Amino acid sequence: MHRTKICLSVLGLCALLAAPAGAQNLNRFTFNIGGGFTQPVRNTDGRTDTGFNITAGAGVNLTPHLGIIGEFGFNNLDLSRTALLAAGVPQGSTRIYSLTANPILRFNPRGRFDAYLTGGGGFYRRTVEFTEPTITTVTVFDPFWGVIFPAAVPADRVLGSFSQNKGGLNIGGGISFRVRGDSQMKIFAETKYHHIYTEPVATTILPVTFGLRW
């Protein structure tokens, strides 16, 4: 995992099956939604703990084998204890938003089981936030008694927030399983390596995502 290297070639992916491949029964548009866990790798490993991800996408199938998907991604990882001690703060997290365009190459698009490769790039926004636990007062309405009263609830106070907007690349693959023989809906599991050109050190993560594609 720590030796993962970026070997993305969008032109290569597109050229592999750019020739017509019998488009009968082709579902022209494709959509996906999913979530899972995110593993920090290489530059990010040791600075953050394992987090979670949410993703959603929509795209066009050029042929049964080849498509292009626009995807929104959100990854959230807590800062590691080592990073918190170095910064002198009690809590912290990293949030990564992304909008990417990703060609997808399917090996068995009409089969019950399929495997695919995908990769691309786009816009990434990374926010590192330092916080500390505190108590805040909110107004609560109790419908049983019909009264409004103040209540103290736990909250996080932001000590500092730092954001960068950068470009980035991703590459990965996955497998999918058709729910029914005549259905367009598939269950998928995939992993993608993301390299984001943040400064002074690149941000590198490996989300593992499970979801539905139709």
Image: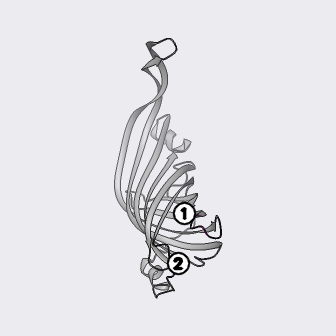
Outermost residue on the bottom side: it is 19
Residue at screen point 46% across, 88% down: 19
Q: Which residues are magenta?
A: 180-185
In the rendered structure, does residue 165 fall within the stretch colored magenta? no
Image x and y of residue 42, in percent: 53, 60
Residue at screen point 51% across, 39% down: 85
Disc count in the image?
2
Q: Is residue 19 left or right of residue 175?
A: left
Sequence-wise, the earlier of marks 1 and 2 is 2
17 over 34 or under it: above or below: below
In terms of secondary structure, where does tag 1 sit? Answer: strand
Image x and y of residue 93, in percent: 48, 43
Residue identifier under label 1: 213
Q: Nearer the viewer, residue 48 or 144?
A: 144
Q: Between tags 1 and 2, which lies in front?
A: 2
Colour setup of the view: one colour
Q: Nearer the viewer, residue 47 or 153?
A: 153
Q: Does the magenta stretch mainly form a helix, a strand or a loop?
A: loop
Image x and y of residue 60, in percent: 43, 71
Tell me, yes or no, if residue 1 can be seen here.
no
Q: Is residue 37 left or right of residue 12?
A: right
Residue identifier under label 2: 25
Q: Nearer the viewer, residue 193 or 181?
A: 181
The picture quadrant where one finds residue 200 is bottom left
Residue 159 image label: none
Amino acid type shown at disc 1: Arg
The picture quadrant where one finds residue 169 is bottom left
Q: Is residue 167 left or right of residue 37?
A: left
Amino acid type shown at disc 2: Asn
